[in-house]
């Protein structure tokens, strides 16, 4: 899976790259918590480099963040109405070990 993930996600703009790689993670057949691990430790670092180096508009980053949040909610089996503030809250008793890409 890693080789397929690396080869097909290389030469795309950030938005289509995020969408394609999220679909690749979705189709991999892992449980939800392992898909979140792939997202956190494989996809987000690959997305962050172009976002940090190149001048990409905020609306594109917000669109990528919305796509990531939709898949996170599906994989973690949380209600679709759960807000992003609840997902990325640092002061809650039960918190996710994830950061929003808008914060970084």
Image (cartoon, grey):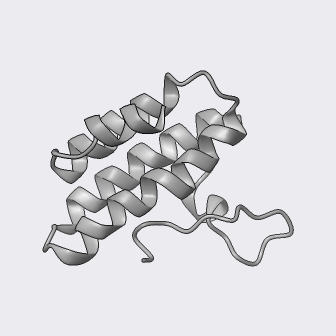
**Image coordinates for residue 34, horizontal then vertical, percent:** 67, 40
Relative vertical location of residue 69 with respect to residue 30 in this rendering, above or below:
below
Q: Name the residue at the right extreme.
A: 93
Q: Quadrant of residue 96?
A: bottom right
Question: Would residue 58 be seen by someone viewing this image from the given angle?
Answer: yes
In the image, what residue occupies the spot 40% across and 55% down?
Answer: 65
Find residue 33 and report its horizontal and vertical position in percent.
71, 41
* Residue 37 percent across, percent down from the top left: 63, 49
The residue lying at 22 percent from left, 52 percent from top is 14
Residue at 56 percent of width and 46 percent of height? 38
Identify the image quadrant of the C terminus: bottom left
Left-right relation of 74 to 10 = right
Q: How many marks?
A: 0
Q: Kindly indicate the quadrant of the structure image that contains residue 77.
A: top right
Vertical order, 1 against 47 (above or below): above
Q: Is residue 101 left or right of residue 31?
A: left
Q: Residue at point 60% right, 21% down?
A: 29
Q: Along the horizontal axis of the image, is 96 left or right of 70?
A: right
Q: Nearer the viewer, residue 97 or 21?
A: 21
Q: Is residue 81 among what the camera can see?
A: no
Residue 98 horizontal/vertical position (percent): 61, 64
From this view, report whether residue 75 is shown above or below residue 94.
Answer: above
Q: Is residue 3 above or below residue 42?
A: above
**Near-viewer residue (86 or 23):** 23
Considering every residue shown, the one lying at the far front of the view is 3
Q: Quadrant of residue 40?
A: bottom right
């Amino acid at each position: 899976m890693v080789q397929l993930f690396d080869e097909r996600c290389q030469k795309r703009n950030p938005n289509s790259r995020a969408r394609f790689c999220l679909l690749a993670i979705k189709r991999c057949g892992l449980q939800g918590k392992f898909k979140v691990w792939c997202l956190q430790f494989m996809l987000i670092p690959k997305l962050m480099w172009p976002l940090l180096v190149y001048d990409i508009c905020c609306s594109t980053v917000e669109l990528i963040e919305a796509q990531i949040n939709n898949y996170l909610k599906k994989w973690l089996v949380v209600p679709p109405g759960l807000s992003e503030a609840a997902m990325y809250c640092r002061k809650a008793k039960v918190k996710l070990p994830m950061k929003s890409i808008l914060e970084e």
